[in-house]
Image (cartoon, helix red, strand yellow):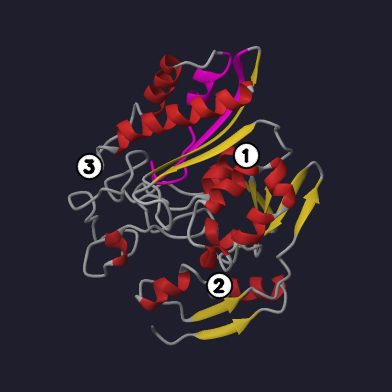
Amino acid sequence: MKAFTLDHAANADDALLLLEQGAKAIAGGTNLVDLMKLQIAVPERIVSIRRTGLEEIAADGTGLRIGALVTNADCAADARVRKDWPLLAKAILAGASPQLRNRATTGGNLCQRTRCGYFYDTTQACNKREPGSGCSARDGFNRIHAVLGTSDACIATYPGDMAVALLALDALVLTRGPLGPRQIPVAAFHRMPGDDPARDNVLERGELITAVRLPAPTGGVQLYRKVRDRASYAFALISVAVDVAMEDGRITRCALAFGSLGTVPWRDKAVEAVLVGEKPSPGLFAKAAEVLLKDAIGFGDNDFKIPLAARALAATLSEATRNAKA
């Protein structure tokens, strides 16, 4: 690890000043410290934001405001989250280990970087790590990589679970920066790689996540299905988040989001439009999968993700609509 200067911000204003000067924020450090050990991230100055008072979960009108420093463990355990936004709790508990959830934060989780092996191997070409060097994954071992939202420059997936649930719940990312406060829909927070894969999200220099806001509870049936190589401590091959409501045997509302399928947490409202107003059936779920995967492209080792996604979608919708009827 290369030498760096560490500052402890006494409040959010102090943190913003240091960030604008080029410092890198650290909260739980569960991702950044690993990257620093491998010299993938080599910040000269780091500012700890642990003392900035952003660790509160509080009612926000009809919704809920989750501070950027709320740990994943505390978020998933919060009685309000478990009751009214259970999808978020389920997604968090499907990720990482208890030790990591005790340390990882809401803001840091949103900003985590890919787990592509070529990104972590500094002997390999990776446009996300070193812009312009190439993408070794395209012709390499790409089993865990994306089939949606890829580009010639990058096919790496966003690895997290929490953001997938937040996407289905229409959450907002609240920030402060040099230009003032912003409210960014989670759907617009992460960036597809295009020809600039080194930039993962839309945060500007000097901008700090302060909270995530959940809108009013929907009252629907919420499920999170994570398909992975082993039952715990593994990133998803495919994950599906669903929030569904039914009336008179028909789907009246449906929000769907997918993890590890695209280069960003993935939501396609055309898929939801196929489902709303219809009676659940295997044929309907297959039609929704066709819409979801119409532009999917495999790169060899990850070709299996396309049929796997269709099966995972059907299984999740079948369970959710069955529970909604009950």
Which numbered dot is residue 211? none
Q: Which residues are magenta?
A: 249-277
Residue type, mark 2 in image: Ile
Which residue in the structure is indicated by mark 1? Answer: 170
Pick the front one: 192 or 321: 321
Indicate whether residue 257 is drawn in magenta: yes
Q: Residue at x 22, y 42 (%)?
A: 299
Residue 277 picture quarter: top right
Identify the residue at horizontal 21%, vertical 56% (top origin).
136
Q: Secondary structure at mark 2?
A: strand
| The quadrant where residue 185 appears | top right
Q: Is residue 6 magenta?
A: no
* N-term mark: 2 or 1: 2
Which residue type carries mark 3? Phe
Residue at the disc numbered 2: 26
Provide residue 144's location: percent of width, then percent of height.
31, 49
Tag 2–tag 3 contact (CB < 8 Å): no
Q: Quadrant of residue 216?
A: top right
Spatial CA span between label 2 and label 1? 26 Å
Q: Name the secondary structure under disc 3.
A: loop
Question: Is 179 drawn above or below residue 311 in the view shown?
Answer: below
Q: Residues within 10 Å of mark 2 (few under 14, many from 20)?
A: some
- Judge whether 72 appears above or below 192 on screen: below
Question: What mark, if any, has residue 299 been given in the picture?
Answer: 3
Determine the residue positioned at 35% across, 76% down. 39
Of labels 1 and 3, earlier in sequence is 1
Residue 23 at x, y percent in the picture: 54, 75
Q: As shown in the figure, which amino acid type bears the numbered disc 1?
A: Asp
Above or below residue 231? Residue 258 is: above
Residue in the image at 56% along x and 24% along y: 321
Q: Inspect this view and state whether residue 26 appears.
A: yes
